[in-house]
Image (tube, grey):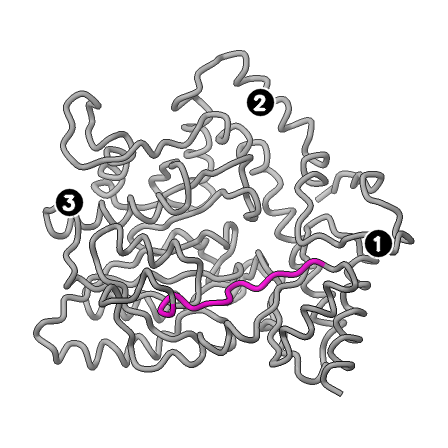
Amino acid sequence: MVLKEIPWSLLREETDKMKQIPMLDLRLEYEYMKEDIDSAIKKCLEHQRWILGPEVKELEDKIAEYLGVKHCIGVSSGTDALVLSLRALAIKLKGQEYFDRNDKIITTPFTFTATGDAVLRAGATPVFVDIDPGTYNIDPVKIKEYLQSAIRNPQSAIRGILPVHLYGQACNMDEIMAIAKKYNLFVLEDVAQAFGGMWQGKKLGSMGDLSAFSFFPSKNLGAFGDGGMVSTNDHELAKLVIMLLKHGGKDKYNVDHIGYNARLDTLQAAVLLAKFKYVDEFNDRRRKIAGLYNEGLKGLDGVVLPIAYSQSPIALNHHVFHQYTVSTSSRDHLQKYLNEKNINNMVYYPFPLHKMAVFQNGRSKIADGLKNAELACKNVLSLPIEPLQKEEVTAQVIEAVREGAKKLLG
C-alpha cells in the first residue's frame, strides 16, 4: 500500500512546550482526505438529493460487501441503530411493537450509556453481566453462569445477548454465538467502536442476527455529524428496520408500526464514502501506534497494557484500537500528571451502567457481582491514538506515562 504524504505542516512545532497532544485530530484527517471529501460534498451540492440520495444506497452496498453480509441499512445514529434493531427483533419474535419488561437482554455494564438505554427504549430489561478484566468485554463464562441459574426461574424470559466490541477489541464471538444457539437467543452486536475489526477472520458486524454501527465523528469511520448503520443477513429483519426508520411503513402515508424519522443524511453518507477508502489504512496506523505503546510501556510497574494483538487478518482477535486503554490503580494521579504535560487523555468510562440513575428502580438486573466492571471504571485511562500521530509524539506520550507512573508509584 502506497501511503499519501501526511500534511505535517498543520501541526505546531514539536518544540512548542505548550502544544496540546490531542486524542484525535479530525482537522488533520480532513486535510489528508480533503480532495476526496470535497469532491463528494460537491456532488451532493450538484444533485441536491438530500434525503436518501444515491450516496446512501452506495454506502450501504459497499459496507455490505466489506462486511460480507446481505443487508446494510443507513440510519441517523449508532443509538438509533441499536433501538431500530431491537424494535425489529420484538416485532419478528413476539409479533408486537416492543418487548415487555419481563423480556431480558444480556449486556455489559462497561460501555457507553446508549447500549443499555436502547434496551430500555425497546421495552426490555437489560441484565448486566460482568466483563473479562483482560479485554474489558463481556465475559462468556459469566453469561453461562447467569443463564444456568436463570433457566431455573420459570418467570425468566431471556431473549438475547448484546455484546459490545469495546475499544475496537472483538468479543469472544465463538463462545457468544454458541451460547445463543444453545439457549435460542438472538445476538445483536454493538460495533460502534470497532469498524473493520475481526474475529477469526470474520468482520465484526457479520456474525450476529443484527449489528449496530456508529459513525459519530470520532469513530474509526466517522461522519461530519451523527450517523449509523444496521447490518444483517436476515431479510425480514432488514425490511422491518427499513420500515421503522421511515416512520414505520412501506408507505409513509399508511404506516404499519410505531416508527421514527431515523434516516442517514445523504451528505453524511457522501462524507463516509470518501473516508471509507481510508478505513483499513487508518486501522493499520492505529495498530502501529498501539505496537509502539506496547513496546515503550512494557514492564512498567503498576500499569496494565491492552491484550497483545496480531497484525494478521486471520488472527483470533484483530483489534482496531478505537482507543488505546491502560489500567492503573493510580489512574487519577496519572491523569493529572498527563494533563500537566498537555497530553490529552480520557476515561472511558467513569461509571458502570448499573450505577446510573436511569437503570435504577427495577429498570435493570444484575447477574451476580460486577466487580471487574466497577474496578475498570476506577482504573482505565485512554491515551492519544490519532492515526496520523507522529512517532515523535507517541514517544513523548510514552515518556510522560513512564515518568508519571514511576513518580506516582514510587
Residue to which mark 2 is pinned? 41
Q: Label 1 is placed on what type of residue?
A: Met
Q: Earlier in the sequence, mark 2 or mark 3?
A: 2
Magenta stretch: give its range: 344-355
Q: Is residue 390 left or right of residue 305?
A: right
Q: Earlier in the sequence, mark 1 or mark 3?
A: 1
Quarter of the rendering occupied by the C terminus: bottom right
204 to 221, vertically: above or below: below
Horizontal and vertical percent position of residue 327? 60, 75
Label 1 CA crowd tier, 10 Å (few <14, some 14–19, many 20+): few
- How far is disc 2 from disc 1 in space, using C-alphas? 35 Å
Q: Label 3 is placed on what type of residue?
A: Glu
Q: Point out the residue furthest to the left here.
A: 154
Picture quadrant of residue 305: bottom right
Name the residue at 34% across, 73% down: 129
- How far is disc 1 from disc 3 in space, using C-alphas? 55 Å
Name the residue at 63% across, 74% down: 331
Asked if residue 158 can be seen in this view, the reply is yes
Quarter of the rendering occupied by the N terminus: top right
